[in-house]
Image (cartoon, rainbow, N blue to C red):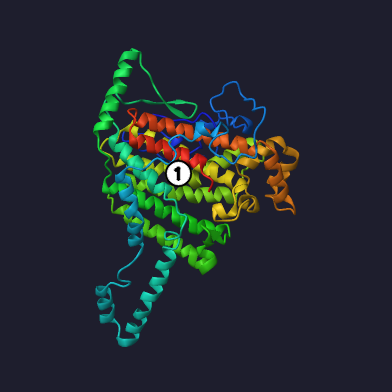
Amino acid sequence: MFITVRCCLSPTVRRSVLPMSSNGHHHHNNQQHDHLFHLQHPSLHHIHCRPFTLFALGNKKGRQSRPAEVDRSRQSLGDDRPPQQCSSAMGLELPLKINERLSTLKEDVLSALLDKNAVPPELISSLMSGVGGSSFSKALELVPSYNQNLQKMAKYYFTAKGGKLIRPTVSLLMSAACNQHSKKPSSATVPSRSGNVISSATSSDSSLRNKSSVAAAVEESEKKPIDISFNQYRIAMVAEMIHNATLVHDDVIDESDRRRGQLTVNARWGNKQAVLVGDFILARATKVLCSIGEPPVIETMAEIVEDLVKGELLQLNGPSTSTGDARFNHYMVKTFYKTGSLFANSCRSVAMLSENCDEILLELATEFGRNLGLAFQLVDDILDYCATEDALGKPTVNDLRLGLATCPVLFAAEEFPEVLNPMIERRFSADGDVQLALELVQRSDGLAQSRRLAREQGDKAIQCADQLLPGGGLVRDCLVDIVRRQLARER
């Protein structure tokens, strides 16, 4: 089966254009991989990425008219509708099973990072037998203190205040959803595409039969307990470990000195040690991942690290052409690689570990994670312009200072092309560029359009949750709630 994207909001990712085998895995070849990385895959030539139509996905009439007035002072990120319409079920209590898993996750992650013995006693004995004496013994005594410092750096972000544990929470909720998902024909939905959103392919059956299917799904969902396997729990651990390793490496690349209200690892211990610590966390995450013992799952999670590297390279090297379409396509692909891939592949992995795994489940889980991940990053990019430094725990307007044109400024450039396009070209490097770009973003519809774009992605994730558990229930409600909370967050 071929899955193709229909608009710019579906990044040109590997699983979007490669054939999928019956077991849910994708066939790869070097030529396809290369074309993907250069954003020129022939399957994507029909995409037309116009910045002014991106917030109106599936609108075949083209450009959608803007609202007569946009309250640019509004700080709500989830919607430009009245707050009561976009905040339902906010703060929904997680199921007890999920809370129990989350309460032990941080401790288990720290346990995976810490060594009880810096050097195993049997190794010391073996080495001592071949090397004379006390000088080697004294050298080994230095290892524990070195190892303790490494572990202190490795757990630095895990123990800091402000960590939201979004990624493991999503992984655990998706695990529960997959384990409750029914493979029975009466309640299953068939993935098809409308724009880039999965929609239910309806048959010619009567509405009475459809109502019976929904009723059966509701009844079955209510009967199924919330269950998460230990291997699915391990995926949640690995997702958080990869995320934290990425934070360490990102702070080095961006030369950041503040995160979560405290000094970054690189600011406190230096760039060289920070790079090594990030590598160490990834190595320990790999150990946890390998303990699952499922090569297809390991391969899927490994894609996250691969995508992170590609995303960082895309960020360091701008688009090959300077058109608005190319910039936005570049931005969305980079956003998937750097943020969406972790959500998408973690959700896919827990689906692969479910006893209910089938092609429909894999696609729904992956699409939920991908759309949520894109919405999450879009909100992050909005907050960089309108949140406070205290709320974020790091400097604001940081993207402009780093020379990055994110969603708000790309939309603003459609209104002020003569001023903003040259700034984007020179990566806001001239004196006064950052301040002027900030003012133009605030004067434009850039933030409002970015909010609508984030909401579009969030709505698609919610549609996936609805199809995953058509009978509703607490797990489905929590998946929807976590999407809405990400759209409405202020930090």
Residue in the image at 48% along x and 42% along y: 486
**In x, y percent, where is residue 289?**
33, 52
Q: Name, please, the residue furthest toward the front.
A: 84
**In x, y percent, where is residue 489?**
51, 44
- Residue 252 seen: no
Residue 140, picture quadrant: bottom left
Residue in the image at 43% along x and 33% along y: 462
Label 1 sits on a secondary structure element that is helix
Q: Is residue 263 above or below residue 478?
A: below
Residue 62 as seen in the image, left or right of residue 21: right
Q: In the rendered image, which residue does mark 1 sit on?
A: 341
- Residue 140 seen: yes
Residue in the image at 61% along x and 35% along y: 449
Residue 337 as seen in the image, left or right of residue 284: right
* Viewer-proximal residue among 317 and 199: 199
Residue 252, picture quadrant: bottom right
How crowded pointer 1 is (Cα within 10 Å; few <14, some 14-19, many 20+) is rated as many
**In x, y percent, where is residue 238?**
37, 52
* Viewer-proximal residue among 318 and 267: 267
Name which residue type carries label 1: Ser
